[in-house]
Amino acid sequence: MTGRFLPFAMLLYVLVGFFLLIETAWGNPDRQTEQRLQAMEKRIQALEKENAELERSLGEQYISANEPEISARLKAVESQVYSYKRMARTIDGLEGITAGVGLTMVAQGLSGAPASSTKSSELNYRGDVTVSLPAGSIGNANGSVFTHFRMGQGLGLENPAGAFASVNATSFQRPGSQTSDSTVLLAQAWYQLDVPLPFSGNPDLSRKHLEFNFGKMDPFLFFDQNRIADDETRGFMNQAFVHNPLLDVGSDIGVDEFGFTPGMRLAYQNDWYKPQSYGVSMGIFGAGRGASYEDSLSDPFVILQAETGQRFFGGLEANYRIYYWRNGRGRDFDGSEKKHSGVGLSLDQKFGDYTTVFARLGLQTKGRVKFDKALTLGAEFGGSYWNRGADALGVALGWLKISNDYQRESLGLDGYRASDAEQLAEVFYRYRLNSQFELSPNLQYIRQPGGNKLASALTAYGLRVQLNY
């Protein structure tokens, strides 16, 4: 403010001095008038000096201890405004970026294993970091990039006594590495383009859209999903309950040794009758050597899925998915590479506000595999029944039916006559300490592991610790 009104003050002093000079020239100046003129001259000199110091201080970038107060205040305001602008630019730059961090640790023991078993207890951990970034737009379609980093140590109890399914699907370690090696792996890196329909319509009003993905990915993110049996870090830990056993345990998904593969996906989603929804999708992924970027486009794994979200039993949420797959590089139980195919069903249905049931059914239609039929089912009960709303109790049963081909030839391959089915059961309780910290005691039972009627039943027990950010 001083810098703005200083010229007017100087002008006022000049005019007053001018009139006093006129009075002196035409009148009779006295000693008092002369003193006033001298005082005015000194004041003008002081104002000129103050103005020069103010202009000099405002020209400097930083605040000094000796500059005028008005200059310091102006610079403080400018600095604050600049910091606000910089913060706004930072927020704009981070808009659309999401990230998540998960740490899973499991301590597990085993009883009933044969004396030849090398493991009776095991400890392992796994870390997962995901980052999703906006990738611009193409017309009215929006793109994004998803990346997933994984690390871990400890193989867990794996498949005790020749069981088909691992009792700890959370375990992760680079094959062939020492347990001290926890090198970070770029597990997934893929691009997604969301295209609202119709193409020329308003994307904010669109109730139909296309999705296109390509890159390195986990096919189970997009196929065979399930609301309560799809995440080994919070739900069921037995591998047979996490995905369709024919695809995962039976390896017909064709992914690499880490569980990932290059590929692409195209999907159509229709939410016009929301909350009901409908969708169809197709995925093409590298299989066998193709999953490790060798001949990736030769004899791929192809899967087609139709799905719907419904509201049954008075508006309770449900999801139903049916799919067909073909693996151009499937592995028979004797190790030979052949074409495999099969069909599957995955569903989850709420019964009441705090009970959700799930079921998966798999049928191998082509390929000489150890088990060719699989059925898993179970339920999760919310803790609101016992005044622990964030807790949950899960119960699941599984049945992996031995194929006729393997039953005939298993004696020569594995030294026992496989028959009937491997039967599984799992119970867990998820106890939430806070929004980031959960503890889950877990109990599993395996009868006739690997279809061997002579094998003793196994019991695996453990505790899972889960941290999420």
Image: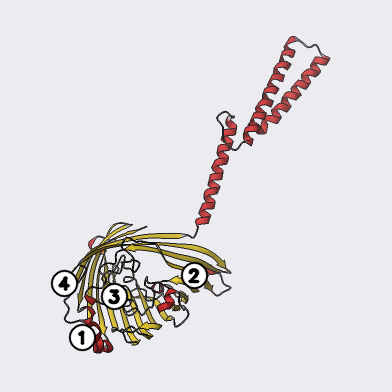
Whichever of labels 4 and 1 marks the residue nearer the N terminus, that label is 4
Give the residue number, with chain letter if any, for mark 4: 115
Asked if the residues shown at circle 4 and circle 3 are in contact, with their CB atoms under 8 angstroms apart, the answer is no
Amino acid on which disc 2 is placed: Gln
Residue at 82% in and 15% down: 25
Amino acid on which disc 3 is placed: Ala
Whichever of labels 2 and 4 marks the residue nearer the N terminus, that label is 4
Indicate the secondary structure of the residue bearing disc 2: strand
Does 4 appear above or below 32? below
Q: What is the CA distance from the residue labelled 4 to the residue labelled 1?
A: 20 Å
Amino acid on which disc 1 is placed: Arg
Q: What is the CA distance from the residue labelled 2 to the residue labelled 4?
A: 50 Å
Does 115 appear above or below 332? above
Amino acid on which disc 4 is placed: Ala
214 sits left or right of 391 in the view: right
Tell me, for residue 309, which label it has, or none: none
Give the residue number, with chain letter if any, for mark 2: 192
* Residue 18 image offset from top left, x and y in percent: 78, 22
Tell how many labels: 4
Give the residue number, with chain letter if any, for mark 3: 240
Give the residue number, with chain letter if any, for mark 1: 417
Q: What is the CA distance from the residue labelled 3 to the residue labelled 1?
A: 22 Å
